[in-house]
């Protein structure tokens, strides 16, 4: 190259002489010889749009003849749809030094190579650096699924997968979800790009359409829609809804009572459109403890007034006809007053009738409401008393005077005949019978039952309660945890102590209780072949929602997989590392590679393994004969033995993630295990149950819940630190719920 970057032309000359017959040159021809070219210089690639990249370069150092540039490209990410190799493209002319490559994938990495060529051959190849096309709006999400969760409210759990790699078209910044019911207004929520699920409240007997779009810096992308129908459900009655007595005056207080109707409950369309409303009146003595729980109600089984009024036995009946509607339903009138016993003539009617009440009796009332999904009722009200019938006094007093006179005469006669005498005896009262034991000592268990075995806390006061318990170095937590230990029942565990089963227990002090242990199908006449150190644990919705198990030993891995197969387990939660502090805590019971592994008669094969920051998800196929079942294992990595995770959000997010994968039907229990299957396992189960419980209730009893779990497996929630951590998890989750609720209110206000 000469000065100032001027390309030098090669001076390679040749001469051809034309000779005559006398070998005398007549003419000579001069020409340049073409050589193999030098490589292109300063090769560069730059995106010009989301689908094009301009490749540019400088001419080779020397001109060696007419030059062609050959450009070829390669995709740096694999795709089943996109081409891996591009070109070749050609550019003719030594001074033509750029080419625009079109029809590329959005936000996709490419590399290009440029080869110079002349008639003499190809020169050296030069590569560009990795170049991304520009961002664009994304394509649709890969999948969209909607699950309807029926509990104390109806929720839609929406899950999705991010767009395929070739459809991402940029960095996904968030997901916008639009949803609407039937012809209602559309609502929008935005979800962080790192999340792939959300939950929204729904109403029964409605069809919901969910529309989701991913968003990049260039805007919202293509939509994916799905519609789901929410079936009407049995209404759920809030804890604080009762029928109460009204101060309204009635015409006859000995036969009538004024009450306040629970209008808010009657107007609740959460679980479907109400099709029937009604009341149930009961004599107080007819109400037992089970009647004080919210339960499903069957209106056709309720009796009429005329069927029960003349009976002396305790009874309940329905005073409202089948077509009765509360005033608040007939109009927007929020009048809540209803008079019990308002109808005088009910003896000849064939329908439900609001007949007179009996004087001087205690009554209790509950309200019910029905949708197409069923009926449910409130708890019974407090006792309401009718006045005495004063019209009967004028007849009763003379009769009593005559009877008293006759009685006195009889007594006088008997005294004279010495036939009348009393031997004074001490007659025990009902209360003394209840509060005294055989030794005559007061039995305080009746009075202490609630306070000793239960520690309910109102959610409204939960934060202040936790702070109070933390004072003086967690003094109250320490005292409560000691009390937990003293109150925890010790159940028989005969099977665990059989000689043939002792080696199947990892720890000698953690033995499976007989009444709740998981029994394997016995193998021939092999004694103890039905034993595994695992117990059924009740959940929020199902009596056998979980199996709490110790981590498998080398000798029990086959039994562990046999339990998974026989109990139809589809979710495994593992909250221990195989080795902790240099000690084996649990055998690696899953295949590490995709090759199938045999466990007895079962064949287990690893399908996929996803390594996330806090946990690993493994999906495995379990085969026996022609039958295959899919099992997902969620392996939490951040929980030290006898300790707690670094912060509550780690575990709460993990628990909530698993809850979205759990089947909503009773297809099989969820298997939870750590090393011993009591400490971390118990803590996980307690938090999972509590997160469901607080969505539907105004109070929580962590102390009582742990005692309940310890009836089924010993030492559930093993350390005081784990006990404190549970309280902190709930406190932090309640704060997060309040934050979300406040943000939702703010968004609604600004949207207006």
Image (cartoon, helix red, strand yellow):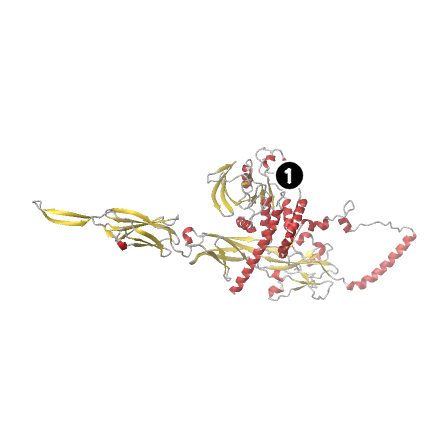
| Residue 125 seen by the camera | yes
Q: Residue furthest left?
A: 22
Q: Which residue is mark 1?
A: 493
Residue drawn at x 61%, y 64% is 328
| Residue 211 seen by the camera | no
Q: Position of residue 462 (x, y in %)?
A: 62, 55
Q: Residue furthest right?
A: 416
Quadrant of the image occupied by residue 271: bottom right
Compared with 372, 568 (above or below) is: above
- Label count reads 1
Q: Is residue 402 left or right of residue 645?
A: right
Q: Nearer the viewer, residue 135 or 142?
A: 135
Q: Nearer the viewer, residue 188 or 131?
A: 131
Q: Is residue 443 left or right of residue 607?
A: right
Compared with 177, 547 (above or below) is: above
Residue drawn at x 89%, y 56% is 409
Indicate the secondary structure of the residue bearing disc 1: loop
Q: Position of residue 375 (x, y in %)?
A: 61, 56
Q: Position of residue 448 (x, y in %)?
A: 71, 50
Residue drawn at x 31%, y 47% is 125
Q: Is residue 354 left or right of residue 621?
A: right
Q: Position of residue 42 (x, y in %)?
A: 32, 52
Q: Nearer the viewer, residue 371 or 294?
A: 294
Crowd rating for badge 1 (residues with CA inside 10 Å; few <14, some 14–19, many 20+):
some
Q: Nearer the viewer, residue 303 or 165?
A: 165
């Amino acid at each position: 190259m000469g000065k100032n970057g001027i390309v030098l032309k090669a001076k390679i000359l040749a001469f051809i002489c034309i000779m005559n017959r006398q070998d005398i040159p007549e003419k000579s021809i001069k020409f340049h010889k073409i050589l193999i070219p030098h490589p292109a210089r300063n090769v560069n690639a730059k995106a010009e749009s989301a689908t094009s990249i301009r490749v540019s370069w400088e001419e080779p150092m020397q001109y060696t003849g007419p030059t062609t540039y050959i450009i070829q490209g390669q995709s740096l990410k694999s795709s089943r749809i996109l081409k891996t190799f591009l070109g070749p493209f050609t550019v003719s002319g030594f001074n033509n030094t750029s080419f625009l490559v079109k029809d590329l994938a959005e936000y996709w990495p490419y590399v290009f190579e440029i080869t110079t060529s002349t008639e003499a051959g190809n020169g050296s190849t030069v590569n560009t650096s990795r170049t991304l096309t520009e961002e664009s709006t994304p394509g649709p999400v890969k999948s969209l699924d909607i699950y309807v969760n029926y509990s104390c409210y109806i929720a839609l759990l929406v899950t999705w997968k991010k767009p395929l790699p070739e459809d991402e078209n940029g960095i996904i910044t968030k997901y916008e979800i639009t949803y609407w019911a039937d012809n209602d207004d559309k609502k929008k929520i935005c979800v962080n790009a790192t999340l792939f699920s959300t939950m929204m409240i729904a109403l029964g007997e409605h069809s919901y359409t969910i529309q989701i779009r991913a968003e990049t810096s260039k805007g919202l992308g293509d939509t994916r829609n799905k519609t789901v129908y929410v079936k009407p459900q049995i209404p759920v009655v809030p804890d604080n809804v009762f029928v109460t007595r009204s101060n309204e005056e009635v015409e006859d207080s000995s036969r009538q009572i004024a009450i306040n109707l629970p209008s808010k409950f009657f107007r609740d369309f959460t679980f479907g459109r109400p099709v029937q409303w009604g009341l149930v009146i009961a004599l107080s003595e007819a109400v037992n403890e089970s009647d004080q729980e919210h339960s499903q109600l069957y209106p056709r089984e309720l009796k009429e007034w005329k069927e029960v009024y003349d009976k002396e036995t305790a009874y309940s009946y329905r005073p409202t006809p089948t077509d009765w509607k509360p005033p608040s339903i007939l109009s927007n009138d929020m009048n809540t007053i209803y008079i019990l016993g308002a109808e005088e003539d009910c003896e000849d009617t064939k329908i439900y009738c609001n007949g007179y009440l009996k004087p001087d009796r205690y009554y209790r009332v509950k309200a019910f409401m029905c949708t197409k999904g069923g009926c449910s009722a409130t708890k019974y009200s407090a006792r309401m008393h009718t006045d005495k019938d004063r019209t009967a006094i004028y007849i009763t007093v003379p009769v009593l005077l005559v009877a008293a006179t006759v009685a006195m005469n009889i007594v006088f006669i008997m005294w004279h005949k010495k036939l009348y005498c009393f031997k004074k005896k001490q007659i025990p009262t009902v209360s003394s019978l209840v509060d005294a034991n055989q030794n005559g000592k007061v039995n305080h268990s009746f009075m202490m039952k609630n306070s000793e075995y239960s520690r309910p806390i109102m959610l409204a006061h939960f934060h202040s309660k936790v702070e109070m318990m933390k004072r003086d170095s967690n003094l109250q937590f320490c005292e409560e945890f000691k009390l937990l230990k003293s109150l925890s029942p010790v159940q028989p565990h005969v099977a665990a102590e059989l000689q043939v089963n002792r080696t199947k227990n990892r720890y000698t002090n953690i033995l499976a209780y007989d009444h709740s242990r998981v029994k394997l199908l016995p193998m021939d006449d092999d004694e103890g072949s039905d034993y595994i150190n695992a117990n059924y644990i009740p959940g929020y919705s199902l009596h056998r929602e979980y199996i709490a198990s110790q981590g498998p030993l080398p000798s029990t891995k086959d039994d562990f997989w046999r339990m998974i197969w026989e109990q139809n387990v589809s979710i495994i939660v593992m909250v221990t590392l195989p080795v902790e502090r240099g000690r084996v805590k649990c055998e690696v019971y899953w295949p590490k590679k995709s090759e199938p592994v045999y466990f007895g008669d079962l064949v287990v094969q690893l399908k996929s393994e996803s390594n996330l920051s806090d946990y690993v998800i493994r999906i495995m196929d379990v085969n026996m004969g022609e039958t295959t079942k899919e099992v997902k294992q969620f392996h939490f990595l951040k929980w030290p033995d006898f300790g707690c995770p670094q912060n509550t959000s780690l575990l709460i997010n993990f628990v909530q993630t698993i809850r979205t994968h759990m089947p909503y039907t009773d297809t099989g229990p969820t298997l939870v295990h750590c090393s011993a299957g009591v400490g971390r396992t118990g803590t996980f189960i307690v938090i999972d149950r509590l997160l469901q419980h607080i969505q539907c209730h105004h109070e929580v009893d962590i102390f009582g819940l742990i005692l309940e779990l310890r009836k089924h497996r010993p030492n559930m929630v093993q350390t005081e630190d784990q006990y404190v951590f549970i309280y902190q998890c709930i406190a932090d989750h309640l704060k997060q719920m309040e934050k979300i609720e406040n943000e939702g209110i703010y968004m609604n206000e600004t949207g207006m």
